[in-house]
Image (tube, rainbow, N blue to C red):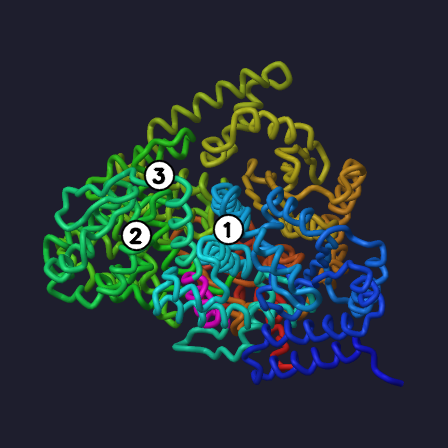
Amino acid sequence: MDKTNADILIQTRQTLIDKFLLGSEPEFIEKHASILDEYLFTIFEKSITARKMTIAGSPFAIIALGGYGRREQCIHSDIDLLILFDQSVPPEVEAFVQELLYPLWDARFEVGYAVRDVNECLEMAFERFDILTTVLDARFICGASHIYTSFMEKFRSDLATKHLKNTFNYLFEHGEKRHFDFGDSTYLIAPDLKSGFGGLRDYHTLLWYAKIKSDIKTRRDLEYYGFLSHFEYLTLEESLSDIWKIRNFLHHITKRKCDALHFEYQTELAGLLGFRSKKNQPDVEHFLGHLHTRMDFLKQINQITFEDILSNIRIKKGSSPSRPTKTDGLIINKRRLHFANTVVILQKPELLLKIFLESGQRKTPLSVEARRVVSEFLHLVDKSVTKNIANIKIFKKIVSLSYWEFNVLNVMLTTGILEKFIPEFSAVVNKIQYNHYHLFPVDKHSIRCVQIVNSFKEPDKSTAGCLYYTVFKDVRNKNVLLFAALLHDIGKSDPAKEHSKTGAKIAKSILKRFGFKPAEIEDIVFLIGNHLALVKTATRRDIFDEETAVYMANKVGKIRLLRMLYLLTVADSKATGPKAWNEWTENLLKDLFLKTMGILKTGELASKKTQRLIDKKKIEVVKLLKEKWREDEINKQLESMSQRYLVYVPTQSIVAHINLFRNLKDNDFIWKISQEDTDIRTVSICGIDKPGFYSKIAGVFFLNGLDIFASQAYSLGEEHILDIFKVTPPKDRLFEKEKWETIEKDLFHAISDDHFLDNALNKIPKTLQVSSGRTPKPNTIKIDNKTSSFFTIVEVFTYDFPGLLFSITNALYRNGINVNVAMAATKVDQVVDIFYIRSLENDSKIETEIGLEQIKNAILKSLPQIIAKEVNNEKN
């Protein structure tokens, strides 16, 4: 049986794809478009219907639009077609469309088409700008070429005479909206290859602009017509080639059109594209760093385009003449900074730096030409410039002028002058940390951190914002804080080492070059070396225990260092992403900062103010409860409660907890469930302090599909305990009441029967597959016997899985350990569960080597074995 034209297309296309995947077809997208052209031409040539329409006086042209028109046909790209008639559209065209496109649809090609006459098409192009841009990319395939030529001439004529300004406005406004919707791909670990800032659409915008302004025909014309320099054109070719290759492989592994480079695809792509580990850097991080370099260039190209478009739509001819600035050799023209000429730079190379100071002070951006000049004259920025005291002062001033809205440091980074002053920064440019935790490459994250610190100069309406402003105002040496922010992650240049300590060492030599005094260097080195200390303590220690604040006060030692460390921690967390910064983290940090500050100021553990607060609460509690209970009974109950509980638990909650306790009677436990918001339930459980009580609660919650966010345990005298859990609500909200009744019954069974939860233990996985782009980290247990006088603190580093908390606490219970406080935190792509524990046998800390080793082994045995998830790297 003879093959159909569609069969030939499918076979030819698959052969082409196979060659591309093997790396032997560098011009894949152009050839892919060509074989589609060949199919369309063949169908048209053989079509009797097409011949009849032409003979009857209705000739037509088949035109490729969009990416297909640009010959950028990736593996699963859409095929957009226009069937264009000169005047009226005959009814016979429907039969031709079926003949042309049905085989493609049957073969599951994504084909979009329109049938129009010339006037209708012109009208629609200028009514809808998304259609206009597809017409800009129009390419004749076959049929009546004169119809295509006539249409394009009319289109360009109408565009130039009637619609030019509106079109420029659309290109600018649509670009801004696209960047807002899809984000800055050069800042994102999971970029959008097409629509994000730095994606292919930025190149397309330049192409459309050049077609509108100069009627260019090919990409090569971008250099010939002066839109790009020769170097920029060569870099553009390399960038496009790499991004198209990545996009095609993404289409291949997802088996569909896909432009969002999601986390789960990145490791496989790195392997398929042949990226290999580099200086202890995993394959996937090497791959993403390379991609970000390419996308960063497209972002710069887009900024060039936007500036040209702005000059066309907002600057009237003859207006805004050039005017000098206070800096000799720099001028302002069309609201952009320019060098007066290049000769003056040869005489005064420090102008390459001073233009950024002028930019920051005036909040006036550098012109595109000025950016080009800085990049091309970087060889003049030698040691005589970078070691000059006046230039160092200018650099420090520039750092203090970098804001998110006006990003002068970022422009210094993209032009290369930042690395001239800090060569060590080169090692973290486009450096990727492959995890869900860090959203941005290290260089962009560091600059973002500086910008956030600078934002503290202005008061914010929020309570926290006011605190940051107040604390920042009290920081005497702002340069110390700003340079700590800029250099805090400089140690990530070597992923094999602990980056805080490495960064502190690297920073020392940088700071000496920048003329910082020994005391200032000591402060910055401390801040860099300890920039994670505050957030780790806040999220991994019980901040309701005043000993935690004492520990932090001893570590920091000085009020001025605490202020800077707090602001650096906030800025670092905010610049990292939502997994590092949320309302919960913000409140924990604030509480720990204020408590530590109080201790550093007064030198007291429990101040008189704290005691007055407790006495006031006791009076309020007695007043609220005296109608239900005798006053001596209430006071006896209050005396049995810890100072920690009385300080941090609100009065109304204390009243509710005492009522709970008084209603316990002879029951094993009694609880109260309250709703904080739609996604969290607070479960207050008062019960007899039996061994394993916490573990059994965790097991029952796991058995019933509830996740535990946090918990606190408080003693109510010698025999009773109060556990407060924050958990997810039952999945079926309609029957939530009934579900809680079931959970309550299960907890009664678990308390009375030590084997009730054995079935739940069997649901804990034995192995856990982890896909992280590198060898998964093993389960790790750390013991801290220094922070607390009363508890041994256990940190468990592992990967999250359902039942994790139950698995660990059950292992502790079976080994004679009582859990008093449990917390959860995040460490990059792992979770950290923290437990404050005491021995059940003698109600004390565990301090013997044998006892501590027994705890470690018991927990490790309870956790599933971590294994790497296999990634298919075969080029099939």
Classed neighbour count for the residue bearing mark 1: other residues with Cα under 10 Å, few (<14), some (14–19), many (≥20): some
Question: How many marks do you count on the picture?
Answer: 3
Residue labelled with disc 3: 316
User: From what the image shows, is residue 175 above or below residue 624?
Assistant: below
- For marks 1 and 3, give the one nearer the viewer: 3
Badge 2 element: helix
Q: Quadrant of residue 273?
A: bottom right
Whole-angstrom CA distance, mark 2 to mark 1, is 19 Å
Magenta stretch in the rendered image: 284-297
Name the residue located 32 percent from the left edge and 56 percent from the top edge.
Answer: 488
Residue labelled with disc 1: 183
Q: Amino acid at mark 1?
A: Gly
Name the residue located 66 percent from the left edge and 50 percent from the top edge.
Answer: 698
Residue labelled with disc 2: 409
Q: Which residue of the protein is positioned furthest toward the right in this rendering?
A: 1
Mark with earlier residue (3, 2): 3
Q: Amino acid at mark 3?
A: Lys
Q: Amino acid at mark 2?
A: Leu
Q: Viewed as shown, does residue 62 lie left or right of 811?
A: right
User: From what the image shows, is residue 200 above or below residue 313?
Assistant: below
Whole-angstrom CA distance, mark 3 to mark 2, is 30 Å
Q: Is residue 485 visible?
A: no
Mark with earlier residue (2, 1): 1
